[in-house]
Image (tube, rainbow, N blue to C red):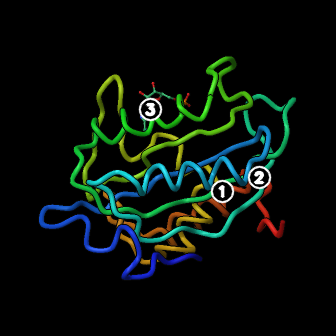
Amino acid sequence: MWLWRSGEEGAGKVSEGGQQAFIGMGSNLGDRRSFLEKASQEIGNHPQVRVIRLSSLYETEPVGYLDQGWFLNQVMEIETTLKPEELLSFLQGIEDKLGRKRLIRWGPRVIDLDILLYGKLTIESPELIIPHPRMYERGFVMIPLQEIAPDLIHPDGKTSREHLEMLKKTEKMEKVRLFQG
Ligand code: AMP
């Protein structure tokens, strides 16, 4: 796990009214690690976003569309004064800037950025669903999330740890391994 050190760029940036949010990141094309690093940097550069924690990197077999390379995944905790819709369009701007092409649903991508959680909010609009609709079925989200926030209480009252235990019991979890690269 990686912690943003105080005194570095970003420290003290977000003040009153900042919400805790979690972002899921994934890449399976090109230099995957560098795309994740670039995305983290872009996110942290926003004046209304402070990066709190980054999980380790995890390597994951693809789900949905199987004829593609393994993903590299990571979860980030932020504090932000952006509203959920503003955060979504900011993240989509980063996906576009880093060159993501939306060709195949669940297909290969240089970077995928999802809002997993935003405070205790639940949202269901055509553009935005929070908690992210598929996060509780995905080991590549729940394993890094439980690494950095095991005791976090989700909108349904359960912790990350409890959610991961439930997912493991379904035995439907895709293969996820710590990335040693
Ligand atoms: P994808 O191509 O899988 O990244 O899906 C992107 C679409 O999912 C966008 O059109 C978003 O409006 C929508 N979406 C719904 N909920 C979320 C969320 N929590 N985080 C990111 N995108 C979301």
Q: Is residue 140 above or below residue 50?
A: above
What whole-number distance in Å separates the C-alpha atoms at marks 2 and 1? Answer: 8 Å
Q: Is residue 136 above or below residue 102?
A: below
Q: Residue at x 77, y 52 (%)?
A: 60
Label 3 belongs to which residue? 93
What whole-number distance in Å separates the C-alpha atoms at marks 3 and 1? Answer: 26 Å
Label 2, secondary structure: give it: strand
Closest to the camera, between mark 2 and mark 3, is 3
Label 1 belongs to which residue? 139
Name the side, left or right, on which 66 lies relative to 41.
Answer: right
Q: Nearer the viewer, residue 157 or 7?
A: 7
Are circles 2 and 1 on residues that touch, CB within 8 Å?
yes
State the quadrant of the C terminus.
bottom right
**Badge 1 residue CB within 8 Å of ligand 1:** no
Amino acid type shown at disc 3: Gly
Amino acid type shown at disc 1: Gly
